[in-house]
Image (cartoon, helix red, strand yellow):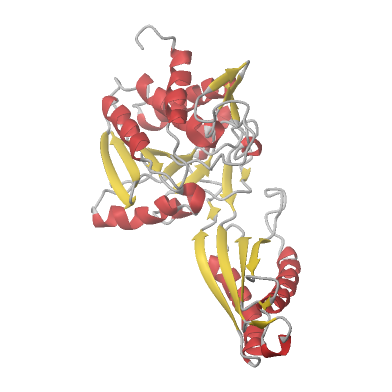
Amino acid sequence: MSGTRPGQRAVETLDRLVAWPTVSDQPVLEMAAGLAQRAEDAGFAVERFAVDAGKVNVLCRRGPRSSDRSKGLVLSGHMDVVPVEGQNWSSDPFKLSQRGDRLHGRGTCDMKGFIAATLEACDRIKGEALARELVLLWTCDEEVGCRGSAALPGQLAEADADPLPFATVIGEPTDFRICRLHPGHATWRIRCFGRAAHSSRPSLGLSAIKLATRVLLALEELEETLAADRRFEGDLPSPWPVLNTAILRGGTAVNIVPDHCEIRVGVRPLPGQPVAEIGALLADHVAALHTAAEAQGGAIRLELLSSCPSLLTDAGCAHLPLLLPWAPDSRPTGAPFATDGGNLAALGCEPLIFGPGSIDLAHRPDEYLLLADLHRAVDAITDLATRACLPAR
């Protein structure tokens, strides 16, 4: 790579990252090893924290550590990507394809472009003596409930690790806008239990699907209630707790009264709103329906399957000015999607969401990142790390 132009090196790095098919149901170990080696080559001390089989978080630290958490910088991103099955791609999604000014491939904007830019930025300053600590944090399983970052507080506590700096930037695709807040996300399963019977004798059974219709009506009523709880208007496209009744499964055959039906519901609590608050509202609705079902010999059960907390970082956080020269708008706003930010805030960090690419292109076939945005991200991260971590000049 010695003869490669600096701008082209970022493209080559992104090419290598995209080639690792780190879909969330697959291991991330190869990519984690590559990121660890790249960090070690740039002078970082690296630790890996196992989350599950084939899944790790990678923590890279360089520079003097301090008990003063106001010093230093954390740059964070997730290694996993969403699936490509069923999508009509024009090229191999796990091979970077440049078409004009677009870099196509799964994860280019969400969010391997930011990771590639960060690696290139670190190479630019690897010969410099740092005055404050620079931390790289690469997580797993963000796309399936932020599981990697959820495990991190316990992992760092068990390792008796030094605390991370407050200043944290998560490079999700925001078109370089600064986002200081976002909703959380939680998934609940509602199971309806009836009694099976021959469909010619329905009075001998209890239809779980009919029980589920009562649940659906209650969810619609709750959705209307939640929609009236409006906050953060101007920062979020849907400034209320969004409820999505997403999956309905039930029954086994057309000649059997169904004895089971399952509903899955996703809710996005508002910034600063605990998942438990939404859970309590759901539980109240389900409890009344369960009592009625129980009287008929049935049951309705509610179970929280996963949750990712919301994020609400103070608008006056000290590292926000570092991002302003690279942002199209000086006013921080909100992201409509969940990130690792809520879990990192539980560590005492103050995350801001800021990165190249558009969330509107993420998770879609032919996902892409503009070449100019990749280069801009390298420059922005180099500048950010320089001003946050290098001695004043």
User: In which quarter of the view is residue 251 placed?
Assistant: bottom right
Viewer-closest of 204 and 324: 204
Viewer-closest of 270 and 324: 270
Image quadrant holding the C terminus, namely: top left
Percent x, y of residue 227 = 74, 63
Q: Residue at x 53, y 53 (%)?
A: 311
Question: Is residue 64 visible to us here?
Answer: no
Percent x, y of residue 60 = 31, 37
Q: Is residue 372 above or below residue 162?
A: above
Q: Residue at x 72, y 67 (%)?
A: 223
Question: Is residue 311 visible to us here?
Answer: yes
- Residue that lies at the very extreme toward the top in this rendered image: 3
311 left or right of 197 in image: left
User: In which quarter of the view is residue 118 placed?
Assistant: top left
- How many numbered discs? 0
137 left or right of 350 in image: left
203 left or right of 161 in image: right
- Residue that lies at the very extreme toward the bottom in this rendered image: 295
Q: Residue at x 53, y 72 (%)?
A: 303
Viewer-closest of 119 and 189: 189
Percent x, y of residue 326 = 57, 28
Image quadrant holding the N terminus, namely: top left
Percent x, y of residue 282 = 62, 74
